[in-house]
Image (cartoon, helix red, strand yellow):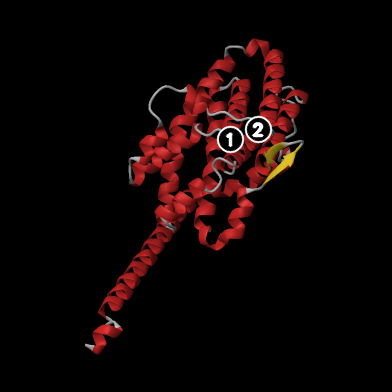
Amino acid sequence: MDIGLLAAFLGGTLALLTPCAALLMPAFFASTVGTGPRLLLHGGVFYLGLLVVLVPLGVGAGALGSLFVTHRQAIVLIASIVLIMLGAAQALGFGFDPARLLPGPDLHARAASKTGLVKTVLLGSASGIAGFCAGPILGAVLTLAAARGDTLGAALLLALYGAGMVMPLLLIAALWRQLGTRGRRLLRGRAFTVLGRQLHTTSVITGLLIMSVGVVFWSTNGLVGAPELLPLDAQAWLQERTAVLANPLLDILAVLALTALILLLWAGRQRRRAADRAAAAAEQATPTPGEQQR
């Protein structure tokens, strides 16, 4: 995995935790979806909604960049400057909402009028592009996608950006009750004032990350000269060790194990439902003190 892919994933995570979005979607998932298989189902549908919007944007950015592939040096310079400017805007709290640039109805409004999985997929589509605080982050990822000049790589970059939003979303939603007030406050970050301007910790961290990527992008000629996060020797060792997994028997065993896990989760959920119904029936059957006196 190169630095650009890692930056896209981290950008998605930080977009979820920006001041405009922090805890809004995790709260929605925790309060309306629940936990277990239902949470995973809605998380998958939410990610599908993200992909429907983000991947075409990535493909478009990659195709646009491929038109100027003969002017690579100029592209690297412009992309580096844009990344540093977007990072500075993010750190200083100067955001923008990319959804306002797109035609069509407001996806958030449409999502609010729906229920169930339709609501979740529309919420995912809206979350991929909407948000004043996350605008510079998406802009930076799209800049990286355009600079790659590769439509497939650009689509992967945007897919990883979406995955960076979904994975912490599911984790926070699953641990929502255990987090408590203090944990939610920590995730939300905190505001502070510098020279009379109010800043936010998450925005500053995100802005510094984007600016760092811009500097690295310029100093490595568009990440061409950037070192691999995993050394080649380590990659060769992992490929050699994982070659044994390319076995039909292991594939069958993996499918059986996954099926067994799904069945166990389903059985556990059915037991919990039965226990809840029994407790509700027992509560209804227990007479109140006033009824006992009568």
Determine whether the residue tagged by mark 2 lies in a helix, strand or loop: helix
Determine whether the residue tagged by mark 1 lies in a helix, strand or loop: loop
The amino acid marked with disc number 1 is Cys
Q: Position of residue 73 (x, y in %)?
A: 72, 14
Tell me how far mark 2 sits from mark 1, CA to CA.
Answer: 7 Å
Question: In the drawing, does residue 34 fall left or right of residue 213?
Answer: left
Q: Residue at x 49, y 22 (%)?
A: 101
Question: In the drawing, does residue 285 fall left or right of residue 38?
Answer: left
Q: Position of residue 264 (x, y in %)?
A: 40, 64
Q: Position of residue 151 (x, y in %)?
A: 54, 23
Q: Position of residue 250 (x, y in %)?
A: 49, 53
Q: Are marks 2 and 1 in contact (CB under 8 Å)?
A: yes
Question: In the drawing, does residue 55 fall left or right of residue 91?
Answer: left
Q: Quadrant of residue 140?
A: top right
Above or below, 46 relative to 139? below
Picture quarter with the N terminus? top right
Picture quarter with the C terminus? bottom left
The residue lying toward the viewer, choosing from 51 and 128, is 128
The residue where tag 2 is placed is 90
Work out whether residue 115 can be spotted: yes
The amino acid marked with disc number 2 is Gln
Q: Quadrant of residue 271?
A: bottom left
Q: Quadrant of residue 288?
A: bottom left
The numbered dot on residue 184 is: none
Q: Which residue is farthest front? A: 196
Above or below, 276 relative to 128? below
Work out whether residue 247 can be spotted: no
The numbered dot on residue 133 is: 1
Q: Residue at x 63, y 26 (%)?
A: 144
The residue lying toward the viewer, choosing from 237 and 141, is 141
The residue lying toward the viewer, choosing from 54 and 243, is 54
Sequence-wise first label, 2 or 1: 2
